[in-house]
Image (tube, rainbow, N blue to C red):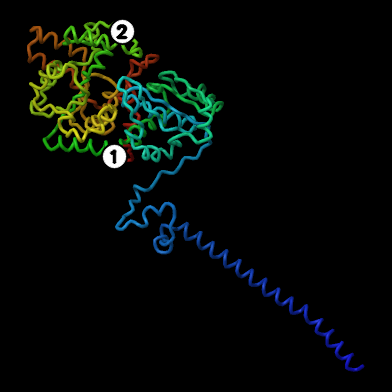
């Protein structure tokens, strides 16, 4: 009995000690868990701090940790990262009101100006801009897409800080368009920004996607906020870079010209389409005049059909002929040995009409004579890409002389002002044709003719000036892109862009 009692007492004592051991084990586990959690928090805090000061510590501590932005450079032997080139402007954060699709119309420089306007409008309306569609149905039938002419990646990234630009609509919005759930319209020409705020923005909010199907001259020249005007310049002179292929070929032409000394670019607007559209037939044969008239009637979007060429020329509304411009260049004492680069398409009348100019200036060249046919094979039948080459050469010329104030003449004039008021001779065509007619009739001697031509153009050289503003007559006032005076006040703009 005594042994049983002792055994029972021992079991009772053991049962009393067991909870104490379990409590100790739980306590140890808790301390271990707290230690691990604390260590994890400390390590995460260190990682965050190292990332935050990555410029200082990154190269030493985090070099082996790849990221999405670094991956493209990691495995390239000898690659040196250009931090300035790789740096992107910060994205502008804004509430997106909808999507803006645009279809440009016209030639290269008409579309170029329109793209600048559409970016400014998209920025003001806080919408997402879809990369503009270029005109493929006009007289030139150029099938080029935006990315065939302009560096699309640069266009998108350079505008990050202003407006969101996408290559195409997101899938959900694309389905809406396919179902016809969008609004398409041509905006009113020469509108101020209040028109877009009061008329277009409500349509964007209602339909989510709006398509502007005509874009030429849809934004006013004057009376716009300064930031809108400067954004138009920023797009034109910074964001609209040509493709690397066009840039490389353009630079090659410029090098070839520079090797032989200074050069003058003559924007000789004497192609068949220009003459048919304008109805100007000075110097043409009866057969040529009839051909141009038939062509004008064949294109329904050329509204003016009955044109008096004589009256129009006397009013200074016709492009100068090759014969007239040869006299003007001589009167201005342009050196006979100066290289004359013709920035234009095929001259109507060919060698016969060019004879006076090539006789006075034997160093007349074109891209087609400077380059091999193989160099231009990818540009053939792509008039906008060919015009892009002429645009590049025109910007870099020592003297730029347009014979008609079309879109290229105006846009190049403004771009050359932006580049430091490079010499651009802005011809007074009305006075010139009057003087030429008097000279050819024998009533005005050469010396007097030359003196008058020089006198008239002494202050028409593309120097600083104020745009002429004509209220309610925007077509008659100075074009914004020919003289973007708001962008020429700050000399730092050129260096910044």
Q: Residue furthest right?
A: 1
In the figure, 125 relative to 270: above or below? Answer: below
Residue corresponding to mark 1: 244
Q: Residue 315: horizontal and vertical position, in percent?
A: 24, 9
Which of these two is toward me, 422 or 23? 23
Residue corresponding to mark 2: 305
Which of these two is toward me, 382 or 399? 382
**Mark closest to the chain's N terminus, 2 or 1:** 1
Q: How crowded is mark 2: few (under 14 residues within 10 Å), some or many (20 or more)?
A: some
Name the quarter where the C terminus is drawn: top left
Q: Residue 384: horizontal and vertical position, in percent?
A: 29, 28
Q: Residue 236: horizontal and vertical position, in percent?
A: 34, 32
Tell me what residue is drawn at x 13 percent, y 21 percent: 329
In the figure, 472 relative to 254: above or below? Answer: above
Q: What element carries label 2?
A: loop
Contact between marks 2 and 1 (CB within 8 A): the answer is: no
Name the quarter where the N terminus is drawn: bottom right
Q: Residue 437: horizontal and vertical position, in percent?
A: 14, 9
Q: Residue furthest bottom?
A: 2
Examine the image and state in which quarter residue 118 appears. top left
Q: What element carries label 1?
A: helix
Q: In this view, does 258 lie to the left or right of 406?
A: left
Which of these two is toward me, 339 or 383? 383
Q: Is residue 428 left or right of residue 126?
A: left
Examine the image and state in which quarter residue 27 appears. bottom right
Q: Residues within 10 Å of mark 1 (few under 14, many from 20)?
A: few
């Amino acid at each position: 009995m005594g042994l049983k009692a002792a055994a029972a007492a021992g079991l009772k004592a053991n049962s009393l000690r067991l909870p104490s051991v379990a409590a100790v084990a739980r306590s140890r586990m808790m301390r271990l868990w707290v230690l691990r959690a604390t260590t994890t928090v400390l390590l995460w805090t260190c990682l965050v701090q190292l990332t935050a000061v990555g410029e200082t510590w990154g190269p030493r501590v985090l070099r082996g940790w790849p990221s999405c932005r670094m991956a493209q450079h990691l495995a390239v032997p000898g690659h040196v990262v250009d931090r300035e080139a790789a740096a992107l402007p910060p994205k502008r954060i804004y509430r997106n009101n909808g999507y803006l699709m645009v279809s440009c119309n016209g030639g290269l420089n008409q579309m170029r100006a329109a793209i600048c306007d559409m970016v400014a409008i998209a920025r003001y309306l806080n919408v997402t801009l879809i990369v503009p569609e270029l005109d493929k149905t006009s007289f030139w039938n150029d099938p080029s897409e935006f990315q065939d002419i302009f560096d699309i990646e640069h266009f998108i990234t350079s505008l990050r800080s202003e407006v969101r630009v996408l290559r195409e609509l997101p899938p959900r919005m694309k389905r809406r368009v396919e179902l016809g759930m969008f609004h398409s319209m041509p905006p009113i020409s020469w509108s101020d920004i209040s028109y877009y705020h009061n008329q277009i923005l409500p349509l964007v909010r209602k339909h989510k996607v709006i398509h502007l199907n005509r874009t030429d001259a849809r934004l006013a020249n004057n009376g716009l906020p300064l930031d809108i005007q400067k954004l138009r310049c920023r797009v034109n002179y910074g964001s609209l870079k040509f493709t690397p292929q066009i840039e490389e070929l353009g630079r090659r032409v410029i090098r070839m010209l520079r090797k032989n000394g200074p050069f003058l670019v003559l924007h000789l607007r004497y192609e068949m389409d220009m003459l048919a559209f304008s109805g100007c037939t000075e110097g043409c044969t009866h057969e040529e005049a009839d051909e141009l008239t038939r062509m004008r009637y064949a294109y329904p979007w050329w509204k003016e059909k009955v044109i008096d060429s004589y009256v129009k020329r006397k009013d200074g509304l016709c492009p100068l002929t090759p014969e007239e411009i040869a006299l003007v260049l001589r009167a201005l004492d342009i050196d006979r040995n100066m290289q004359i680069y013709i920035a234009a398409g095929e001259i109507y009348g060919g060698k016969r009409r060019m004879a006076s100019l090539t006789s006075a200036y034997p160093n007349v060249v074109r891209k087609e004579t400077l380059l091999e046919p193989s160099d231009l094979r990818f540009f053939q039948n792509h008039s906008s890409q060919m015009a892009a080459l002429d645009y590049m050469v025109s910007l870099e010329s020592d003297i730029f002389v347009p014979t008609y104030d079309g879109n290229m003449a105006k846009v190049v004039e403004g771009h050359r002002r932006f580049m430091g008021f490079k010499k651009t001779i802005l011809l007074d065509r009305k006075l010139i044709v009057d003087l030429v007619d008097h000279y050819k009739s024998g009533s005005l001697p050469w010396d007097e003719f030359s003196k008058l031509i020089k006198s008239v153009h002494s202050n028409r050289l593309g120097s600083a000036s104020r745009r002429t503003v004509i209220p309610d007559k925007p077509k008659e006032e100075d074009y914004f892109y020919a003289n973007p005076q708001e962008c020429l006040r700050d000399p730092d703009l050129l260096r910044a862009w």
